[in-house]
Amino acid sequence: MGQRIPTRLGDGSLVEMTRAEIEADLHAGSELAAKRAKVDPLTDDEIAHLLDIFTSPAKFSSVDYGDEVVLSFDGSGNADIGAPVLEQIVYQNHHGADMIELWHHDYSYKAVRTVLSFQTQLLKDAQMQTVVPLNYGAMPDLGRYSQPDGPIPNWSELMPLGKVAEARAAQEEAMTHLEKDMWCVVEAMVAAGADGLDFDTAGAAGDADLLATLRVARRVRETWPDIGVEIGQAAELVLGMHGELEFDGVRLAGQWPLGQLRAVTAAGATIFGPAVNVNTTKSLAWNTARACALVKPVTAEATIPVHMNAGMGVGGVPMTPYPPTDATSRASRAIVDICKVDGL
Amino acid sequence: MASTHALASGMGGMRTAGDLVARMQMTRGMRLPQAKQYVADKLGCSVLDLSDTVAMHDLRRDLGLGRIQVQDLTYADQPGAMEAKFHIADVLDIPINSVERFKAHAGLD
């Protein structure tokens, strides 16, 4: 039995594993990604580098001099101060944020529209007090438009009844409402002085959710050439809740991060945020290797910056309210070193 | 978690030139090496300087790009937030939406 090394599972719990067990998990995570997404597994050198990171006894790990990346900090602020503008200043001044993001507690464009005048005033006030670029962000959140929360028949209830055509029609109708709400918020935020928009967790409700987001992104790009558009994904795979929707002739359902990048780039976004969800029962090494293997082809092909999602429960960061420093720093470094991302 | 990422892999935000590189990414869609080189060329410094708090503290003062108050080090006689963004727009040669809005509202166009 080899020396047991402290490490973490995807739920954040502390476990001890041997070097051989960690190495086996790195290979397993990488190979699963390769099999599912039809990408290349990590190379031997990359596995060796990850093994160094995950077997180090240090509590903290960091990138080398000169390899630092831009941190866009979706959802800046912890909502603990009760003053959204002050929280942006805190993230700028005390957390080293390269970009910040104003947001509402009900993180959905549909909800934001109901309090839009107050959110735009906060954004204008924030711009008077901050220097770093400021996004406004929320989720497209297509599910909000289905009954009982919204006006559209619930496609998740229609499908089990075999009413596939009705379910598809419901999603298409919901998209028109979503695009209208997103555009309403976008126009107001640009008028208030936003540097950019963040369409966060795009595709959370499946391919229709993503398609509506791409359409709004393209409209932003055509209207304001200098306004930033960041599209962050909800997961590594676009769910085919509709199944037949296409963007520029390409089917969205079933797209892995590389396909998502192509769609987001075509829509005119300036930053793409791939998301790879964490398996809470697997080790941090397994999760990080899987995430790196899925995203490495994205950064190899990208013509726009790639800011990989690395918040709680994505990108190898454990799914827990207080992601441990040892785990988060290792995931942070590993993603930068292996994937050569432009930011997180 | 935010602080951990900042220490593990972040450029450093306003303490360095992280915000300036971020602007080139979000407004021009530049990849990281291209954005860093662009900003370094505009500032007249090396790419390595962009993540160095000591180098950037002086450079941000010289160019009026805004600095963070740290206890007794105040910068009341130097550009504040909006004023600094006027200089950032000039130095990086990009329009900044909030600056353009400020100019329009203040009748500075």
Image (cartoon, coloured by chain):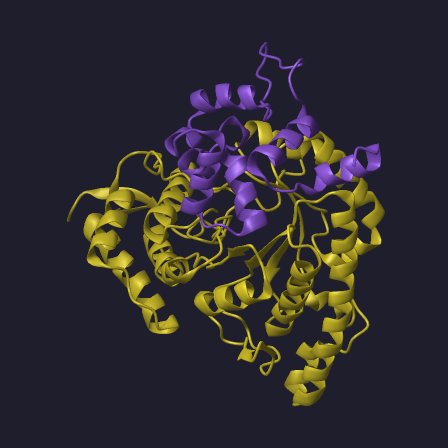
Chain colours: A yellow, B purple
Q: Measuring 40% from the left and 62% from the top, which residue is drawn there? A: A301
- Residue most extreme to the top: B72
Q: Measuring 38% from the left and 38% from the top, which residue is drawn there? A: A326
Q: Position of residue A115 (x, y in %)?
A: 83, 49
- Residue most extreme to the left: A1
* Residue B5 appears in the picture as rendered: yes
- Residue most extreme to the front: B109
* Residue A321 appears in the picture as rendered: no
Foreground residue, A227 or A138?
Answer: A227
Q: Position of residue A4 (x, y in %)?
A: 23, 44
Residue A288: which quarter of the image?
bottom left
Residue A100: which quarter of the image?
top right
Residue A302: which quarter of the image?
bottom left
Left or right placement of residue A174 versus residue A309 in this view:
right
Foreground residue, B30 or A58?
Answer: B30
Q: Measuring 40% from the left and 40% from the top, which residue is drawn there? A: A329
Q: Position of residue A343 (x, y in %)?
A: 47, 46
Residue A146 versus residue A225 in the image, above or below: below
Left or right placement of residue B80 versus residue A339 in this view:
right
Foreground residue, A102 or A303?
Answer: A303
Q: Position of residue A36 (x, y in %)?
A: 37, 72
Q: Measuring 50% from the left and 42% from the top, which residue is drawn there? A: A71
Q: How many marks?
A: 0
Residue B41 versus residue A22 in the image, above or below: above
